[in-house]
Amino acid sequence: MGRKLTDAQIEAFHRDGFVSPIDVFTEEEALRLRKELEAAEEKWPEAFQGAARNNAHLNLMCLDEIVHNTTLVDAIEDLIGPDILNYGTVLFIKEPKDPGFVSWHQDARYMGLEPHVGVTAWVALTEANDENGCMQMIPGSQGAIRQHNDTFGEENILTRGQEVQDVDESKAVSTVLRPGQMSIHSARVVHSSQPNRSNDRRIGFVIQPYMPPHVTQTITPTGAQLVRGSDPLGNFERLKRPTTDMDPDDITRKDWVNQTWADILYHGAKMRRDY
């Protein structure tokens, strides 16, 4: 038995490459976080456009709260140990009836992180189900990195529109979540999500990844936050937590991180776009 996860959940993660659902927030807490996020969207719309949706935890208190939530981090510790860095975050917001989708892919393919021992926490601030485009996982697919093709598809919301070929979709498992729950998945597991066919937004906040300090960035230097324990190696520039929303220094720091991310995620690509 771990700090948060049961032995069965830990076994499922190592067997399948993911574990879901995991209770983190109550539905009432998730609704509060959603309202705070949407109030920030209304007040600072430019902070949510294109690549600005990346690493918004560096300048928004409600998202910082999620990253450092004790219950959430306890679950991460059960999988990667007591010394924990947060590499970054992404907001995946699918508007009602939005055709945007995520193709089958492995996170580790383009992130430049070695070794692939980090884990991604996908936190639902709304319902996440088959109708509104919850994540789908291929159990046991967390082996070798597969060949990906860059499509740059207009409705594909991944940076390159990258996709793995020849996925047996009959094996796919939907990670259905209520608001306040999360799933955790390996950087190597093959996963995707479909468009939002519902009449409400689907909001997922992704911490990607939590990782132990011995992980390194192999493409270009960037930053990370110390979430728990210690970081004796210092492989990443230490990023501080915000103390207020949209502090100019925090925005400058986030913009730098996002520029390094663009250099990493589009490394070797034929084109770039503002994702």
Image (tube, rainbow, N blue to C red):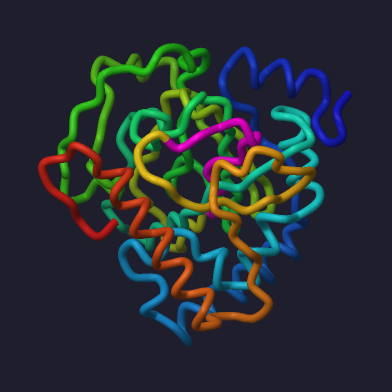
Q: Is residue 184 above or below residue 264?
A: above
- Left or right: 132, with 210 as reference point: left
Q: Nearer the viewer, residue 194 or 82?
A: 82
Viewer-nearest residue: 135 or 143: 143
* The N terminus lies in quadrant: top right
Residue 273: where, in percent of width, then height? 20, 55
Q: Main secondary structure of the magenta part?
A: strand
Residue 215 picture location, percent across and down: 56, 32
Name the residue furthest bottom.
Answer: 43
Q: Residue at x 61, y 44 (%)?
A: 234
x, y (%) of residue 120? 56, 38
Number of numbered labels in the structure image: 0
19 within the magenta span: no
Q: Is residue 234 left or right of residue 160?
A: right
Residue 30 visible to an observer of this rendering:
yes
Residue at x-position 68% and y-position 77% = 243
Question: Does the magenta segment cover residue 215?
Answer: yes
Q: Residue furthest left?
A: 270
Magenta highlight range: 205-217
10 vs 163: above or below? above
Asked whether, in this view, residue 158 is left or right of residue 201, the answer is left
